[in-house]
Image (cartoon, rainbow, N blue to C red):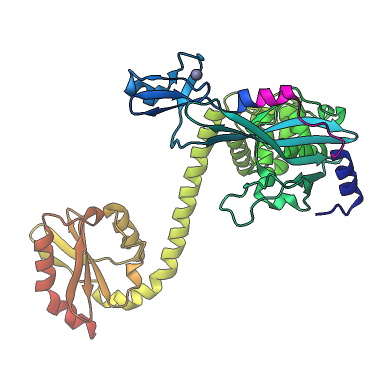
């Protein structure tokens, strides 16, 4: 696109004045960004670096760890899916300055390999990211094949041109595999905390954020790298809302090693009403230990709260249940040690389910209009829970602990069946 804004025009003008990549930078890229390869055909190994070939005497070993070329001495990896003119490629960046801009130049470097020959190296400058003093990024890019399955199928014949809203494209977010070691950095970026590392971020986004976001800048300068990464990653809101505690850490020279755990811990401290300005809580010597302790405490409170909620639910359901089931309440069937009687309250459903670990409570069997739920007990302990269909006068199911049938199952079902006429009589009361 033709440059439209003043800033875009300025970038295009300055871009034309950037020097081409030097011989030294090119050689560095070829040596550092690409791997060295061999390929085997039958029992012969071919060095794809110098063209030498030799007999492979350690087939298994070379296929796992690669080999060393006896001619050029390079340690070589085995190239997978070799065909003549196969390629290896990578992105690398050169970081420099031009006038008032910090510039990240992105190159695509490629090596073309063929058995018996030395490889051919090539490189293209495919993108430039220009960062101004306020962190605003203006990007230039080569064109790509529109219908390719890859988002970076570059058209190498195209020129770098201005790309507005480039951050909406995947290409904008490419992290270079390597960065040329010698960098030129404007004083502003050094002053705002840049110490030579990009922490796996794209360099242009990193440089932009440290001059445009005071939280990021502060964290970086304080050496709070874990918090910094987390802030730029998935938990910016959590860090902003814990900012007072972050400041306590910085004042006490306490480095947060694991931002994820620390942020969770701050949430717990908040929950327990602890003083979030106190270094005693906010800068624990044993964060892991304190965190586990508080997590357990919170877990126990949650469990109790859930139980209270269950109780409230039980109370609400109890009246309807009594109206429906009242006429069956006093039924008792017995076969020697086995005593079968209805579950008489919703609370008994809850306890039966706890005891036998099945879903008679969670699935609200006390609400089922057609069901009478009975409990078979021995020595007052539940053995199986029985569901009787009132319309069909049949045992629908009878299940023990964890829904498994017990040794008493057949006797229990027989006992209920034998008493079905008694149940039938009650239905019409
Ligand atoms: Zn070689």
Q: Say which of 137 and 282 sits in front.
A: 137
Q: Position of residue 398 (x, y in %)?
A: 19, 64
Q: Say which of 35 and 243 sits in front.
A: 35
Residue at 82% from the left image edge and 31% from the top image edge: 19
Q: Position of residue 86 (x, y in %)?
A: 51, 36
Quadrant of the frame with the N terminus: bottom right
- Residue 339 magenta-drawn? no
Q: Say which of 330 and 297 sits in front.
A: 297
Quadrant of the frame with the C terminus: bottom left
Question: In the image, is 384 to the left or to the right of 99?
Answer: left
Residue 132 visible at all: no
Up/down of 79 relative to 173, above or below: above
Query: In the rendered picture of this protein, how many numbered marks are placed on residues?
Result: 0
Question: In the image, is 309 to the left or to the right of 42?
Answer: right
Which picture quadrant has residue 229? top right
Q: Position of residue 186 (x, y in %)?
A: 85, 29
- Outermost residue on the front side: it is 116
Question: In the image, is 97 to the left or to the right of 279?
Answer: right
Residue at 43% from the left image edge and 59% from the top image edge: 310
Which picture quadrant has residue 377? bottom left
Residue 95 visible at all: yes
Question: In the image, is 182 to the left or to the right of 283?
Answer: right
- Residue 24 magenta-drawn? yes
Q: Position of residue 121 (x, y in %)?
A: 62, 30
Magenta-tinted stretch: 16-29
Which picture quadrant has residue 321? bottom left
- Outermost residue on the bottom side: it is 428
Up/down of 15 relative to 179, above or below: below
Residue at 76% from the left image edge and 35% from the top image edge: 104
């Amino acid at each position: 696109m033709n440059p439209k804004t003043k800033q875009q025009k300025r970038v295009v003008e300055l871009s034309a004045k950037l020097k081409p990549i030097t011989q030294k930078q090119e050689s560095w890229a070829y040596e550092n960004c690409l791997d060295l390869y061999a390929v085997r055909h039958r029992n012969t190994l071919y060095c794809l670096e110098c063209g030498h070939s030799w007999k492979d005497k350690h087939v298994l070993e070379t296929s796992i760890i690669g080999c060393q070329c006896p001619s050029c001495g390079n340690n070589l990896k085995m190239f997978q899916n070799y065909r003549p003119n196969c390629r290896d490629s990578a992105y690398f960046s050169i970081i420099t300055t031009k006038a008032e801009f910090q510039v990240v130049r992105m190159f695509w470097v490629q090596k073309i390999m063929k058995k018996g020959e030395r490889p051919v190296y090539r490189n293209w400058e495919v993108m430039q990211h220009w960062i101004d003093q306020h962190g605003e990024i203006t990007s230039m890019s080569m064109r790509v094949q529109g219908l390719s399955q890859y988002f970076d199928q570059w058209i190498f014949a195209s020129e770098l041109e201005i790309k507005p809203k480039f951050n909406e494209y995947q290409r904008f977010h490419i992290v270079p595999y390597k960065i040329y070691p010698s960098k030129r950095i404007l004083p502003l970026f050094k002053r705002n905390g840049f110490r030579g590392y990009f922490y796996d971020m794209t360099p242009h986004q990193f440089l932009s954020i440290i001059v445009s976001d005071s939280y990021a800048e502060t964290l970086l300068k304080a050496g709070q790298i874990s918090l910094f990464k987390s802030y730029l990653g998935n938990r910016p809101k959590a860090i902003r809302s814990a900012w007072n505690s972050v400041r306590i850490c910085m004042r006490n020279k306490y480095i947060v090693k694991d931002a994820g755990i620390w942020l969770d811990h701050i949430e717990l401290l908040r929950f327990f009403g602890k003083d979030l300005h106190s270094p005693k809580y906010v800068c624990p010597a044993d964060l892991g230990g304190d965190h586990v302790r508080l997590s357990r405490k919170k877990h126990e409170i949650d469990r109790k709260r859930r139980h209270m909620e269950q109780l409230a639910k039980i109370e609400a359901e109890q009246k309807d249940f009594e109206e429906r089931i009242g006429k069956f309440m006093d039924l008792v069937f017995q076969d020697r040690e086995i005593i079968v009687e209805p579950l008489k309250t919703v609370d008994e459903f809850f306890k039966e389910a706890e005891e036998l670990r099945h879903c008679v409570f969670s699935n609200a069997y006390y609400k089922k209009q057609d069901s009478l739920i009975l409990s078979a007990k021995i020595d007052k302990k539940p053995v199986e829970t029985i569901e009787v269909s009132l319309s069909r006068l049949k045992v629908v199911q009878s299940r023990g602990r964890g829904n498994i049938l017990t040794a008493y199952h057949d006797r229990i079902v027989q006992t209920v069946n034998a008493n079905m006429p008694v149940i039938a009589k009650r239905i019409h009361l």
